Amino acid sequence: MKTQYYTYLIFLLLFFVGCTGHRSEFARFDRAYYSPLGMQNAYLFSTQMSLKDHKDGSLWELQRGVSALMLGQYQDSLIALDAAEAQFDHHINLFNKSLSNVGAVLVNDNVKTYVGSIYESVLMNYYKAMDYLLIGDPNNARVEFNRANDRQRRAKEFYHKQIQKAIENMHQRGSSRLSPADSDSKVQEVLGEDYSNLDRFSAYTDLINPAVSYLSGLFFALDNDRSKGIDYLKEAYGISHVITIGEDLLFFQHPSSQKFTWVFLEDGKQATKQEFKITLPLPLPEGMYTASLALPQLVDGVDFHTNFSLNTAHQQNKFEELVLLDDLIANEFKKQLPYIITRAITSTVLKVGLEAISNQYLGVLGGLFSSLYAAVSTSADIRSPSIFPHRIYTAR
């Protein structure tokens, strides 16, 4: 009996190790990245983790690439961002094919390989374009701007088709214990009660980042492709209504001999995720159960400053806000939520069913083990980048 007891404990500890992901490591990177003299440490640590943590490899490569860019190490940044992009494309294609993961349903989403969000992949190409501009390679910068905008075009279609298909698959998986109608009801209940704050995010519903459109528009307009550049400027203006972009539209439609310098300024820290747990009543064939559900929830980003101005010998210009990244992140997160909640409910139903079976056939010790396992394995996937700004401003 004692041997059996220790065996249960060992399995429990092994499961616990993989249940919450590398939260302490991500927190360590975050502290270094936002410390006054910590950028080099952030770069070195993300490099170390990209070699060690293959499951979250694309996220570590992304954070390594942006850290290198901030340090002025543009070639190193390109190598890391190339690796992040390759892994993102590989895993997003696998997601399109499989749309499910048995291990994640039996444990939680932290055991899955990190896939990432569309906005992250768009910014990968956006920052790669910056790297190429900074090393004087406009041809490759053009390629990256095209890729970034193409990703934005496909984002809406991706979520419309793939996430709905994933939800249908999860309904089928859980239908033996929880009907699709019951599952839909629970999903809508959680969305209505615990995510109502997301309704305030109304901008960027098509997941178009106006900073990407604006910089792309300026690049193409200045690189002998004025028509294409003006189209992107129109898109950026239509989303952001920034006065400077409107002036740029007039300028490029009727060019003059004036010379300008455009300044993009990033400030603050993007929205991140935290875990919160709720309790749900679950009607199952064995009776009514009460189960805990762990879900990710967005935490608002933070500003480091409130306003900026650009002073020259002839004028003083106030920077205009081009994008609040929280809105973009929140709108994509809102599109992902039905899928995330459905998976979490299905996982909870399976674990509650395991508890019922263990109590019936394995006695008190088996029931205790299954209850402990359900408790420690109920953990939300809160992995996300922490290297993007809260707001992007512009001035000319």
Image (tube, helix red, strand yellow):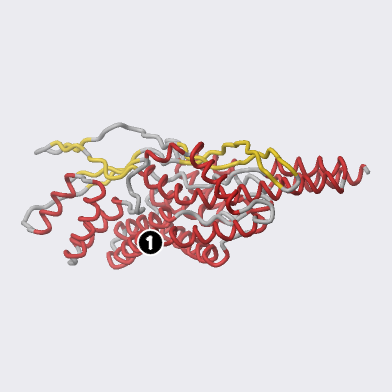
Residue at mark 1: 151
Q: Residue at the location (67% across, 40% down)?
A: 291
Of residues 158 and 118, the one nearer the viewer is 158
8 vs 191, left or right, is right
Q: Quadrant of the N terminus?
A: top right
Q: Residue 310 in the image: x percent, y percent?
A: 19, 38
Considering only vertical position in the picture, is 59 above or below 363?
A: below
- Check disc 1 and report its element: helix, strand or loop: helix
Q: Residue 171 in the image: x percent, y percent?
A: 60, 56
**Which amino acid type is shown beneath numbered disc 1?**
Arg
Of residues 190 and 246, the one nearer the viewer is 190
Q: Residue furthest right?
A: 1
Q: Residue at the location (54% across, 59% down)?
A: 166
Of residues 67 and 117, the one nearer the viewer is 117
Q: Residue at the location (30% across, 31% down)?
A: 306
Considering only vertical position in the picture, is 349 above or below 77?
A: above
Say few, some or many: other residues with alpha carbon within 10 Å of mark 1 (under 14 / 14 to 19 / 20 or more): some
Of residues 30 and 275, the one nearer the viewer is 275
Q: How many marks?
A: 1
Q: Residue at the location (21% across, 55% down)?
A: 233
310 vs 98, left or right, is left
Q: Residue 394 in the image: x percent, y percent?
A: 24, 44
Q: Quadrant of residue 212?
A: bottom left
